[in-house]
Amino acid sequence: MLFQFLVGALVSAINIGIHALVTVVAVAIARSAGLRVTVRPRLHLMGVMVATAAVLEIAHALEILVWAWTYDIVRAAPVSDSELLYFAFVNYTTLGYGDITPVQAWRLLGPLTAMNGVLLFGWSAAILFEVLRKTLDHVGLIKDDVIP
């Protein structure tokens, strides 16, 4: 059981590192795009938010791939590679269909994957909110804390 926790902690740490790197990149891109002078602030805001969300989705997909590779390395479930990716998605998003079950020796990886996914989705939501707030401040769509 301890080995499962160690593997899960290592993969979680790798994913947190990936998310930190993507956060730095996404915020830098959003900052440079968000600070441009624009004649169409609403359209500009939409572009910045869509780009930020897309970058974060790519990060989540990469993090799910890391979990799927880990499942493959430790043989966490008796399924093919494509099914391992599906299994990782189901665990990471906490969807939990239950149509694929892990082998007994690695059953804690699913909840550890879910815990990692919940944390990183929350982090992404915070990033999106901060980019939205900063961009709204810059383009002048917020006046007295009210969006027109």
Image (cartoon, rainbow, N blue to C red):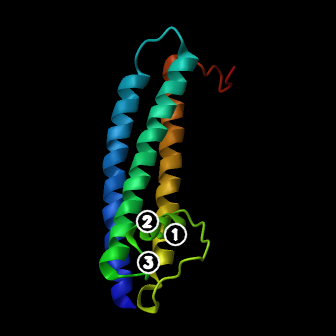
Who's the residue at 32% across and 40% down the image?
25
- Quadrant for the C terminus, please: top right
- Which quarter of the rendering shows the N terminus? bottom left
Q: Is residue 146 above or below residue 25?
A: above
Q: Is residue 144 left or right of residue 73?
A: right
Q: Which residue is mark 1?
A: 91
Label 1 sits on what residue type? Asn
109 vs 27, nearest the viewer = 109
**Residue sitting nearer the eye, 99 or 7:** 99
**Can see residue 81?**
yes
Q: CA distance from mark 3 to mark 2?
A: 10 Å
Question: Nearest the camera: 28 or 84?
Answer: 84
Q: Mark 3 vs mark 2: which is more N-terminal?
A: 3
Relative image position of residue 127 (x, y in whole percent): 47, 43
Residue holding disc 3: 79
Q: Residue furthest top?
A: 39
Label 3 is placed on what type of residue? Val
